[in-house]
Amino acid sequence: MSSFSWVKEFRASRSRQRMMQLLLRVTIGILAGIYALFPVVFIISSSMDPANSLAYSRFVPRNASPVNYQRLLSNPIYPYPRWMLNSIKVSSTSSVLAVFLTALSAYAFSRFRFRGRRPLLLTVFLIQVFPNTLAMVALFLLIQQIGYYIPSLGLNTHGGLILVYLGGVLGFNTWLMKGFFDSIPRDLDESAMIDGASHWQAFRHVVLPLVRPILAVVGILTFIGTYGDYVLARVLIQSKEDFTLAVGLYTLVATQYTQQWGVFAAGALIGALPIMVVFLFLQDQLVSGLTRGAVRG
Amino acid sequence: MNTVKVRARGAFRPLAFFLEAIPRIAPRLLGLAVVNAFALWFLYQLVIDGVWFLSAAISIIALGINVIFLREHLYPFRWLSPGLVFMVLMVAYPVLFTVYTAFTNYGDGHLLTKPQAIRVLEKEQYLPEGAPTYQWTAFRSPSGEYVLWLVADNGETLLARPSEPAQKVTPGQADVGPLGEDGIPQSIKGYQRLSRVDSVRFLSELGKLAFGQAPNTIKINTLDQAAQYQQQYVYDKKQNALVDRATGTVYHADDTEGVFVSSDGQALRPGYQVLVGWENFQRLLASPALRGPFIRVFIWTVAFGLLSALLTFVLGLFLALVFDDPAVPARKLFRSVLVIPYAVPGFISILIWVGMLNPELGVISTALQKLLGWSPPWFSDPWWTKAGVLLVNLWLGYPYMMLVCSGALQAIPDELYEAAEIDGASAWQRFWNITLPLLLISVGPLLIGCFAFNFNNFVVIYLFNRGGPPMADAMTPAGHTDILISYTFRLAFASRRGADFGYAATITTVIFLVVAIITAFNFRYTKVWEEVSESV
């Protein structure tokens, strides 16, 4: 009997210990959650605070109003809508082109066996170790040089910026996509080719429809990556009208941080929202792509 | 096999074969022709300007495309070619060009290539003594082009257009109308005579123009007088020098310094780019003015990369462990909330943090002020700025580590823990002896990747405080939180002393070396390379 009560007591203490442990975990979770959400909540409330100054910003704004959003969209000195459009234009063009170029390369690496395939594939892997932002000086000089002869791809043009972005995104994405292409059975496109389809037709009508998920992932990753780029846009684009959002938002803040806080907050929120929504919805797919060896850039 | 088949069907007919092949290869040849025409046009310009390095890259790309599309057995490369062109031009070329630039004096004062500099200098003009002078009348076209009607002292008249030799014209002939009472044509076809008032109005525009053709160009001196200028410098290929025609001085090209200098040491501006050997590297390592800031920046770069990787890993792993227990209520919700920093574009979150930490007005600073009566000088004190950047970077980076660690934790087999528990290992012992070692196998390469990423994390450094506060005692512009890449940016684009691309490229070359070493280390001591090689 005595030994039985001992076990009971032990179990009770175990379960109490377990409860305490779970409680501790939840507490940590709540604290960490506050840490994670603090800046986001803060920026939401600042954007609705008509005071528009960092000095008066507080957590629960008095007289919440959309006046900062109106100020943001109608400010002639800081053409925010232009910046937003520029960013969307540059990033979407880059991602569409990147998807197209990587799909071609991935198909070749996945379906053909040819001399030089292996070294080339490894080179593609190695070359992405050097992110092209490192070579910003050389890229600046290169784009300047190209601009002397082809002005529409020179400095201060979105064309030049897109060219540079494309160079930077191909390496990692080629690997990501090739892996996915490999998982599509070769019999499918080979049987199409036995029926007389060319490589191009097999690629276009058999393989591409099957790899749509990875096309979307590569497209979205490229969009997020180029949208968030500050360095290259800053180096290559010089006129305020042509700024991308990252560069524009910084100039807005750098000059009048404390007085324009509410307007900045509104801009930051509008700028971050599309990316956040896409990211949180497609989290699983994107994260599995990102964590295959790449840190977000 | 093929030839056998062809023979079997009948004699091999080259002409028929060729005619059959045309529709098949014509589009390809046409495409190649377009590519080649474009490449040749581009190369022609580059060669004229002496831009050798880029010319070489373009030649290689163009040659490669031709070979790939003409040789049948290189068919797979046709699929790769668009991507390869971008990789060569936008990734490989810039890396090589950076290393090349590190060995040149490229920068303000030496921005042009030698042919370009000669062309600029040869446009300089001077007014020789006793040069013919003229009275001028300007005619302006609606699109803003000008011609001059010139009357020399001896009464001779000339018509001068930009970059055409000035010529005698009989009034009433060609496009020139009959003379008016003042001896000046009343009209020139397509142009309108400027009144005295308009001449004054357009004088500054007119003064910049050169009429007639080199070397005898005519420029407007004053409102009343134009004179025949002459080209001042003429390049003499034999002497490799520019000769000043006004004074007879010979400016020899100094191809080690990249300037034209006379024997008494006078140098012409602009200079041009030349290879300077290891000079930039010597400056980096030997010049006290440059070595000091460079070493300090280098140390902080390594520290920043290491600390960022370590802090994000510790917090990320801690949170992953906290939510590794499936019994935690609302576990999924917690996890999605904790990932939010990862979803906000980095540049936006950094700027928000900068606002929150603002020493006078930011919420965090004012809250600390109220609680402790003191808040840290986040942006003016070197150490607090460093702490601030690390704090912001921790917020930005821990979700990635958390995600990675959560995945890796699930891959550790439960039996190991059960066995350890039976052996009486404490939770702490289990963590140190099972979890951490096994985790590091899969997460280790990512930690190294995280270090390499933060080693070059320009955005967080620059947007937080532009690398500042500035080092007061440094001879070159450098800040206390500058990392190598932001220091490079300063030297190349944001220095008041002018751009020094050569020196900036030297530092970039150092970064390349470090990144290459990290990568080699990563491949040597982890299984990444084997995995990559296998999945080929």
Image (spheres, coloured by chain):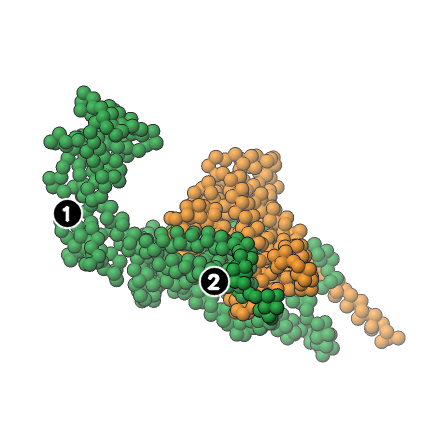
Left or right placement of residue A30 versus residue A109 in this view: right
Q: Secondary structure at mark 2?
A: helix
**Residue at 22% over, 24% down:** B178
Residue A88 location, x and y as percent?
55, 45
For label 2, the residue is B67
Residue B146 location, x and y as percent?
28, 33
Q: Quick one: which chain is green? A: B
Q: Are marks 1 and 2 on the same chain?
A: yes
**Residue at 60% over, 55% down:** A218
Residue A50 location, x and y as percent?
56, 36
The answer to whether any part of residue A8 appears in the image is yes
Q: Quick one: which chain is orange? A: A
Q: Nearer the viewer, residue A94 or B269?
A: A94
**Residue at 30% over, 57% down:** B273
Q: Which mark is residue B246?
A: 1
Q: Nearer the viewer, residue B320 or A62?
A: B320
